[in-house]
Every structure is written in C-alpha cells, then in structure tokens.
Image: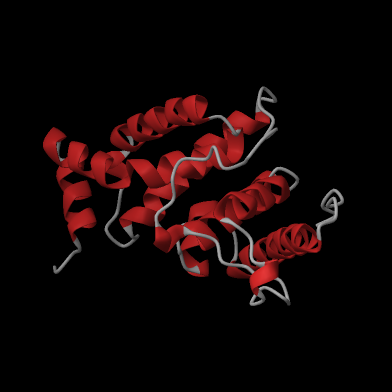
Amino acid sequence: MDWDPDTQAMLKVAAGDKQAFAWLFDRHHASVARFAFRFVGDAARAEELTQDIFVKLYRHARSYKPTAKFKTFLFRVATNHCLNEMRRGEYRVARLTAEAPAEDDAGAMQMPGPDGDRPDQALSGRELEAAVGMALKDLSDRERAAFTMCRFEGMAYRDIAEALEASEAAVKSLIHRATLAVARRIEALQAGTVPARSRA
C-alpha cells in the first residue's frame, strides 16, 4: 500500500527498527513538547513528559494499525499521558506565556478581535502568546487538549476525536468553548483591560 513516510516508519518501529524510531522522534519531538507544555506550563517538565510519551509510543508500537494516521496515534498517546499526569494533581498550568517552546509560523495563533486589523490594535507575538496562555490555563484539560491539537497542530476534528476517544460533536463543542475563551482574552488585551477569569 502507498503509505505516507510516518506510517512506513512506524510500521518499521513495530518491527523493531530503532533508526525509524529515532527519525520519528526528530520529526515530531517539537510538536509533542509544545503540546505537553500547554498542560504543565514548564519547559523542563514538558521535555520530561515528551520523553515519556515517546517511550510509550515505542512500547505500544505493535498496537499501531495503519488505518489510523500516525499523528493521530501519536497524539492519542500524548493526550492520555498528559491527562493522566494532570489527574495526579501535581501540576497546575500557572503560567503559559512567551516562554513556551518556539512555534513556527504554521503553528502560530491568529485570532484577532473585531478591531484586529487596526494597526493600533495589533498585538505583538509576546502579547498574543500571553493572552492565549492566560486563557488556556483556565480551560479544562480536555478543552486544552482539543484546542491545542486543532489550533496549533492543524489536526482535523475527526483525528482529534480519535485521539481523545470522543465523538466529533464533543470535540467541536470543546474547541468552540476554548476558542471563545481565548477570543475574550485577546479582545480584553486589545481593549487594554484586565481580562476576567474565563467562564468557558
């Protein structure tokens, strides 16, 4: 079958190919680290979680089926691991600011408010990241996971639903509530007011 390079590599990993695993790690490490950071708010801890996630990926390689996209499988492992960590109650997303691991242009958030086209209302990258971070820390863990996969990783609702083991309707609802919360933060920052705690 004409599988994409990620799928081909993962099937090799399932057969014990460590070089294929190293290739996948290098290719997807940054996006998983960013995802983990959205939960714990600390770059060093996010890196530890990323290492754990890839260890789990390797251990569960034989359960991978090429009917699912590799990225969906990867983020299912990542989501389950991050949610389990959060349930332990040891972490609080206390600060999600411009200290987040660097995003490339394709993963950047672009959610201007109604006056976002006005030069005097434009937000700098740091201000936007801070606004998004403040909103994300007030979201539920599943809202944060769904929003991050959608807005930062560009994943389709169908793939997010599979990663979260939820229905597409539930995913759309999670992303809608999260998007409203983030938009309110951005609009408040543009208006120069102190944003109220998210009610999403």
Query: Outermost residue toward the top?
Result: 90
Q: Nearer the viewer, residue 126 or 119?
A: 119
Q: Using residue 155 as the reference point, say whether residue 1 is left or right of it.
A: left
The x and y percentages for residue 2 are 14, 69
The image's colour scheme reads secondary structure
The answer to whether one can see residue 165 in this image is no
The x and y percentages for residue 187 are 76, 64
Q: Residue at x 43, y 39 (%)?
A: 33
The x and y percentages for residue 83 are 59, 38
Query: Outermost residue toward the front?
Result: 120
State which quarter of the image contains the N terminus: bottom left
Q: Nearer the viewer, residue 184 or 90?
A: 184
Q: Using residue 181 as the reference point, say whether residue 49 is left or right of it.
A: left
Which picture quadrant has residue 137?
Answer: top right
The answer to whether one can see residue 10 in this image is yes
Q: Nearer the viewer, residue 100 or 163?
A: 100
The x and y percentages for residue 123 are 63, 60
State which quarter of the image contains the C terminus: bottom right
User: Total marks drawn?
Assistant: 0
Vertical order, 85 against 141 (above or below): above
Q: Using residue 119 as the reference point, say whether residue 37 is left or right of it.
A: left
Q: Residue at x 87, y 51 (%)?
A: 196
Q: Residue at x 20, y 63 (%)?
A: 4
Q: Using residue 131 as the reference point, say whether residue 9 is left or right of it.
A: left
Q: Residue at x 15, y 33 (%)?
A: 18
Vertical order, 86 against 158 (above or below): above
Q: Nearer the viewer, residue 35 or 185?
A: 185
